[in-house]
Amino acid sequence: MLETEVLIIGSGAAGLSAALGIAGHKKVIVISKSNSTIGSTYFAQGGIAAVMDKKNDNFVSHIEDTLKVGAGLCKKEVVAKTVVQAPSIIKWLEEQGINFTKLNHSRELHLTREGGHTNRRIVHARDATGAEVQNNLLIKARNHPNITILPYHNVVDLIMLDGFDKKQCVGAYVLDIKTNHIRTIKSSFTIFATGGAGKVYLYTSNPDTSSGDGIAIGYRSGCRVANMEFIQFHPTCLYHPKAKSFLISEALRGEGAILKLTDGTRFMRKFHKMEELAPRDIVARAIDYEMKRTGGDHVLLDISHKTKAFIITHFPMIYRKCLNFGFDISKEPIPVVPAAHYTCGGLETNMHGQTSISNIYAVGECASTGMHGANRMASNSLLECFAFAKFAAKKIINTPHSPPSKKIDIPNWDESLVINSDEEVVVSHNWEELRRFMWNYVGIVRTDKRLERALRRINILQKEISEYYGNFKITHDLLELRNLALNAELIIKSALSRKESRGLHYNTDHETTKREIRDTILRKRSS
């Protein structure tokens, strides 16, 4: 049994920056499902949105762009508070050793532009910003005496107790993936920084760790969940049977890449005045429409009109990766398809990152802070990670508490009445079925009939998974399947409750956008 003041679940940008912000004042344990590097942060190519060119850009413009893309559901005070933090966040990251790309080898940052932004304001480290951030923050965290990182650990559930007037989280049961045993960790504060739920879909840009664990665990614990219908599909993932989930950064379009049909015809001009730099939901729907109209299985993204030197300088990782799959992007277009990319909804939080349960926090993609609304603007995600990690750290540092272990006796995990599974194939079959019907019925374009069909299917799967979970010893795969199934249920129910099309949620049975602006809130009923 372990004890800490703050338990952080997730080791990406949000989790590590929160840990580093808190560790000067309290002891921290960081839980990671993998080796602490393989997560959404590591694979982020684009960058961090920040107003750094004060001559040609300003906070008002960044705020207005974000609100416009968010389709009415952003919280303006959250957006404003986050946007003004960006320059100081970039400075802090540079102090941590992050080497951002400079302009012509000078000290001035090179800024690029992405969809939805009216100005160049994307700070980046070539085309591998996430890897640069992840590697440097991980080194800092590993070397901090007050931070303990536990790799290959997966949280089963939080330990919730009833207090005098409200529920309180006193820790978590955690699966040690290497030994397959459950450990008990006591904590005064818990922060979810677990990323999104992209693996609920058959095609996704997300890594295998993105199974929506924080959202599902938080919901089961009693936290409110908001706006889960808003799933962002990235317009351009490499179309290749062996590429799995390789993302082609929006920064290519920011630097002039053009979308074409397989016959070479441009098509974005008829969908939006910003053409290739339109918001992601519009670009993804346009590609989806053209693929269905033509019967094609992909479209093309062409940057070959730029010089080879320009491409290699700006996009070295993408150039090398595509070359490995047989595409020389300096000479030919890239075959691309949309894929599930970002979960805009999640655990509802206030301005401090607190959920509806006061000592449970959520930061990063697993949270619904009000920053993204109905559609996330490109490169606002990493900005939100760092900003809300900072807000949460400040709140926790200034909140007095008494360690739960001094007052509460927490029982160890009991698995004496369960047995080892003799049918692991059930987990893989359910996983495959879940991801396929979510792609077919709850994808880029939705209908009431498809959503209702998906709800019936998820109800059947939930019963099978619950029975399996209750009778057999827990495994890593089973935990992820259980969490993915709950995320699917939350997405479907949220989508069914929104009788309009707004932002990322497009339903052909309700194509108009209502004047009434509301969040979709779900909360587990008390048993």
Image (cartoon, grey):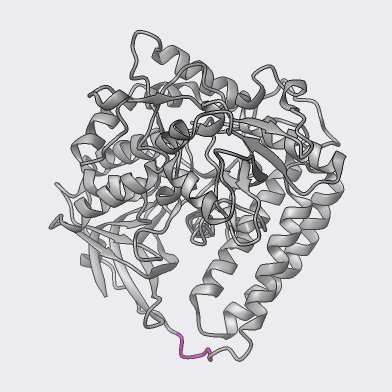
Magenta-drawn stretch contains 119: no
**Residue 507: image x %, image y %?**
79, 37
Vertical position of residue 67 compared to residue 414: above or below: above
**Residue 296: image x %, image y %?**
81, 46
Left of 432 or right of it: where is 420? left
Q: Residue at x 80, y 61 (%)?
A: 456
Q: Quadrant of residue 517?
A: top right
In the rendered view of the protein, which quadrant contains the C terminus? bottom right
Q: Residue at x 33, y 41 (%)?
A: 389
Q: Quadrant of residue 10?
A: bottom left
Q: Nearer the viewer, residue 475 or 186?
A: 475
Q: Nearer the viewer, residue 240 or 339?
A: 240
| Residue numbers of the magenta segment | 415-419
Left of 308 or right of it: where is 6? left
**Residue 327: image x %, image y %?**
59, 49
Q: Residue at x 40, y 79 (%)?
A: 413
Q: Can residue 234 be seen?
A: no
Q: Can residue 479 be seen?
A: yes
Left of 190 or right of it: where is 347? right
